[in-house]
Image: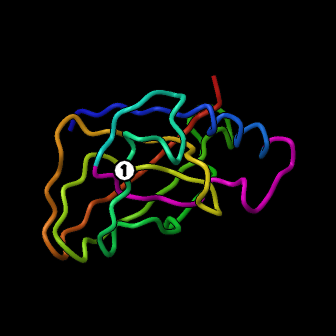
């Protein structure tokens, strides 16, 4: 499926904070399904065109795993994985990644076409950011 990904300005600030030794709230941790998804790098958690799903199983939650992996240079990639399971029908336009206390939008992925989910349908999500050469 075609898609577009954006790391937000808020996301870059979180990366800088983490690189300077921050822990806890500033770490990349949460994932949420989006029912509306358009925007730019200036988007924030409160951005009008980034709308979070309110349906059970698709609301903001801790990702199943956040790991450091390798793309080019050892430890140059952060990978976040999760499987969202719809508790009710919903149409998903994208997925967002947030910080640990869920108040900052690190980045988002908008789908070119919305995905209709029925009860118990799943959507598997993987977010990778590489910092190597």
Magenta stretch?
19-35
Q: Where residue 12 sits: x, y (%)? A: 66, 34
Q: Residue at point 86% right, 42% down?
A: 20
Q: Secondary structure at mark 1?
A: strand
Q: State yes or no: residue 25 in magenta.
A: yes
Tag 1 residue? 51
Q: Quadrant of the N terminus?
A: top left
Which residue in the rendered view is the most extreme toward the right? Answer: 21
At horizontal 33% and vertical 73% (from top left) the residue drawn is: 57
Residue 14, image quadrant: top right
> Where on the picture, by quarter, is residue 13?
top right
Q: Is residue 112 left or right of residue 44?
A: left
Q: Residue furthest top?
A: 133
Percent coordinates x, y for residue 50 in the rendering: 39, 44
Q: Is residue 86 magenta?
A: no
Image coords of residue 32 (percent x, y): 42, 59
> Who's the residue at 86% across and 49% down the image?
21
Q: How is the image coloured?
A: rainbow
């Amino acid at each position: 499926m075609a898609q577009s990904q954006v790391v937000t300005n808020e996301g870059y600030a979180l990366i800088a904070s983490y690189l300077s030794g921050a822990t806890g709230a500033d770490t990349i941790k949460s994932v949420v399904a989006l029912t509306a998804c358009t925007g730019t790098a200036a988007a924030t958690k409160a951005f009008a065109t980034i709308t979070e799903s309110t349906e059970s199983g698709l609301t903001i939650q801790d990702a199943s795993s956040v790991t450091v992996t390798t793309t080019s240079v050892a430890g140059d990639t952060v990978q976040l994985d999760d499987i969202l399971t719809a508790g009710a029908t919903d149409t998903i336009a994208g997925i967002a990644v947030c910080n640990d206390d869920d108040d900052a939008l690190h980045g988002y992925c908008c789908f070119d076409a919305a995905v209709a989910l029925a009860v118990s349908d799943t959507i598997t999500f993987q977010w990778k950011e590489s910092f190597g050469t």
